[in-house]
Amino acid sequence: MSTQERILERHEEYRVFSWRPKFSTRILITLIITLHVSLCFWGAWKHSPTIDEPAYLASGISHWEYGRFDLCRVSPPLVRLVAAIPVRLAKPKLDWKNYRIGPGVRAEHSVGRDFLIANKERSFWLFTLGRWGCIGFSLIGAWVSYRWANELFGIRSAFAALLLWCFSPNILAHAQLLTPDIGVTALSLAACYAFWRWSQSPTWLQVSIAGCLLGLAVTAKTNAIALYPALIVGIFIHALTLKQLKTFKTVGQVFIAFALSIYMINLVYGFEGSFRPLGKYEFFSSTFGAEETNNRFQGTLLEAIPVPLPAAFLEGVDLQRRDFENSHGNMKTYLRGKWYDHGWWWYYFYVIAVKVPVGTWILALIGIGGIAFRASPHRIEILCYLIIPGAMLFALACSQTGFGHSLRYVLPAFPFAFVVGSAAMQITSNRWQYYSSRTAMIWLLVSSLYVYPHSLSYFNEVAGGSSNGHFHLLDGNVDWGQDLLYIRDWIKNHPEARPVYVAYWGNLPLKQMGIDFKEPQLEEGKPIPPGWYLVSVNHLRGEYRLGKSEFKQIYTQSKNGSISCSTWIFIQK
């Protein structure tokens, strides 16, 4: 009997189960997936467009209309291309008067606003269609989470990973939007799963699938670039343990996979501007640019090298790098009631500490402990294809210390933790761990569904819950402009609340979209007039972009307010 067979016999909780689900198992999987999709469909319909979504949707439509990728270059186009498909079939009105192109030009937000004005109230339905079109990405993440956990640990872990994906408040929050975050999260996990499958069966077909998925992940969002060094390190460590470092076939297949991923990136962009010499670009970040030429590679041996990537992709990386450098301190970081003109390497550790459910933390710790201290036959594989890629995705966000922002920047690391944490459910030999893992799963489900559909505003119980989230973080962590329709419905259902004033945080053209709120007219240092007030928590905390400082006094002077839908509601008598 081999060593691995003895391990499997002694530690049955880690036995690998084949992919042959029973009929009852398929029924349960279907019920969980159906509920997840229903929650995403409902949330997509009930929430108004967030700050970035108009730019994404209008840009996606422009890609199909003109075959160009000038708009929204700061982010790759895959998800918005998918979102635009059902919207184009609905024949929206289009207005391209502010479509401007040129080096460093960022016209996507102006074009997005024009799209809203042109389609008026129908915009809400068009965004719902676009969001529904992107739910498929979440299904990919759910399927891969279940499948990978099942093959590593067993059926109980498979259901745990599925539940962690389908009911995590942070997954639910972004799965109902047409932003690229769930797309890159699901495809990053799928790419690493494909590379793990390749390590088990190194065929040319398997490595081709892995390479294509890696390329698609990068075309969803550029932070998936972190998977390249992560997979190189992981494959090296795995090959080292198997003593296959000198295998020419292995090295060749990895090269083919990476080459296919580059081809896939170019294919999604239609090869627009591919292989342009490096010296022909005009850069705007300090990383790639220089004061004299806006290209630090000009006059060097590298200027003639053709870049095997689309021009819009490389230009987007440069623009994103300029934002994260935050050289002039224009981008602000909010943390615990204060604003800063810089971020910190530990900022996203704080974000996940307050935004991730306590139940998820417990499962992750038990799962990691079980893998580390039990003789799991897949320990090295888990390290190479789950822990290292997840950690690298998280570390990339932490390395951008120019400013700190939303949890969505580290969201791609989450499913890797879900699969590792699912191992906790397979441990049956320790009674304390057995009951702790089940309790943690129930806690997670109750905590998440209690807050739904306001999952974007979720904060765990240790942080004081969602009603106190605005003390810790702001913007996309709490109010991203998503609750406009809830505010409208609240006013309609409370006729006694008159006069009512609304301080909405967002840049939507409200009057053109059929919504006409009366905004409070306040002056600093003067008493607040009588009435009902619905004020975004971003205004209360003096958000630096769209916030209005005069609204801060509402929070300091009001004593009888409450948080509802990320909005401060109070009566001034």
Image: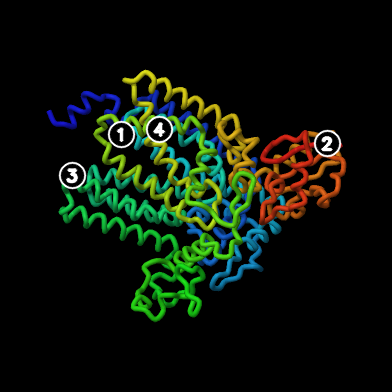
Q: Marks 2 and 1: which is nearer the front?
A: 1
Q: Marks 3 and 2: which is nearer the front?
A: 3
Q: Is residue 121 above or below residue 311?
A: above
Q: What residue did someone put label 2 on?
A: 497
Amino acid residing under circle 4: Leu
Q: Looking at the image, which residue is at 45% across and 46% down?
A: 412
Measured in 3D between alpha carbons, the distance from the residue under mark 4 to the one under mark 2, in whole angstroms, is: 47 Å
Amino acid residing under circle 1: Ala
Q: Are marks 4 and 1 in contact (CB under 8 Å)?
A: no
Label 2 sits on a secondary structure element that is loop
Q: Is residue 378 above or below residue 103?
A: above
Place of residue 153 in the rendered image (x, y in percent of width and height, measured from the top left): 32, 31
Place of residue 421 in the rendered image (x, y in percent of width and height, measured from the top left): 39, 33
Is 281 in front, or is 325?
A: 325
Q: Looking at the image, which residue is at 56% across and 62% down?
A: 62
Measured in 3D between alpha carbons, the distance from the residue under mark 3 to the one under mark 2, in whole angstroms, is: 70 Å
Q: What residue did someone put label 1 on?
A: 372
Amino acid residing under circle 3: Leu
Is 559 in front, or is 262?
A: 559
Question: Does residue 54 show up?
Answer: yes
Label 1 sits on a secondary structure element that is helix
Q: Which mark is residue 242?
A: 3
